[in-house]
Amino acid sequence: MTSPSSRRRRGAGHELRAVVVGAATDLLAQLGDVQALTMRAVAAAAGVTPPSVYRHFPDKETLVRTVIEERFDAFTHDVTAAAESAGEHPTARLQAMARAYVRSGLERPGHYRVLFSATNAGPAALGLAGRAEHPGARSFGALVEAVTACLPARRVDTAVLLATELWASLHGIVDLRITKPEMPWPDAIELIDAALSAVRAAMEPGP
């Protein structure tokens, strides 16, 4: 049990917000359901009193929105950092990004599902209505940029279509392995390379 003195220490200063967000993130990863999350449970996991949580987050929707925003930021950082480390060649950067996407999701399956399952509570209710405002927009934008760099004519409309197809494939690779672990799935790297085949085909000159 957390002692009152410990609660006071953890509830003081600017660190409280990060502690609360971290606790909410981990709880959502375990529960997999926004509706099951309570502010009281978050406070207990963070080792603080419920009023301390409400001091930073007026309601659960605000807290969940913050969790989703921060998880998407971390996720975007993972995939863009992988692209940066792959060098200057566009296809190598895109491949590194795709592999980082799958690796990040499979290494932290609970956190990955927070990104896509938490919004089941309703995007509008969580303040996520509108694609431009959605915290996942930056992740998708980075993918579109990476695909665009691979195309000879750098057609943005084509890049958006291919990036959407690629994201759907990568999401399927991760989500199906998380939800159906008993299935004899092919090697993840092989599936990623297959998902990238549409981009490679678009890079080839036409007849």
Image (cartoon, rainbow, N blue to C red):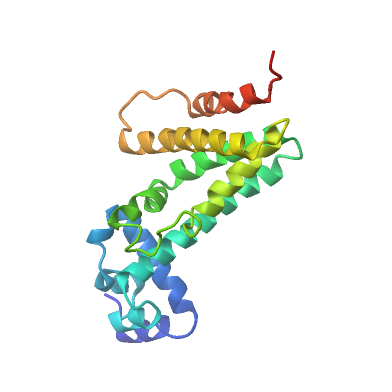
**Residue 23 percent across, percent down from the top left:** 37, 66
- Relative to 36, is 106 above or below? above
Q: Residue furthest top?
A: 207
**Residue at 30 percent of width and 77 percent of height:** 2
Q: Residue furthest left?
A: 36
**Residue at 50 percent of width and 45 percent of height:** 104
The quadrant holding residue 87 is top right
Residue 80 left/right relative to 7: right
**Residue 10 percent across, percent down from the top left:** 41, 80
**Residue at 48 percent of width and 85 percent of height:** 13
Q: Nearer the viewer, residue 190 or 196?
A: 196
**Residue 105 percent across, percent down from the top left:** 46, 44
Residue 139 left/right relative to 107: right
Residue 98 left/right relative to 90: left
The quadrant holding residue 62 is bottom left
Q: Nearer the viewer, residue 133 or 65?
A: 133
Q: Which quarter shows the C terminus? A: top right
What number of labels is visible? 0
**Residue 27 percent across, percent down from the top left:** 32, 60
**Residue at 38 percent of width and 53 percent of height:** 114
The quadrant holding residue 60 is bottom left
Q: Nearer the viewer, residue 131 or 176?
A: 131
- Relative to 102, is 45 above or below? below
Q: Which quarter shows the N terminus? A: bottom left
- Relative to 85, is 169 above or below? above
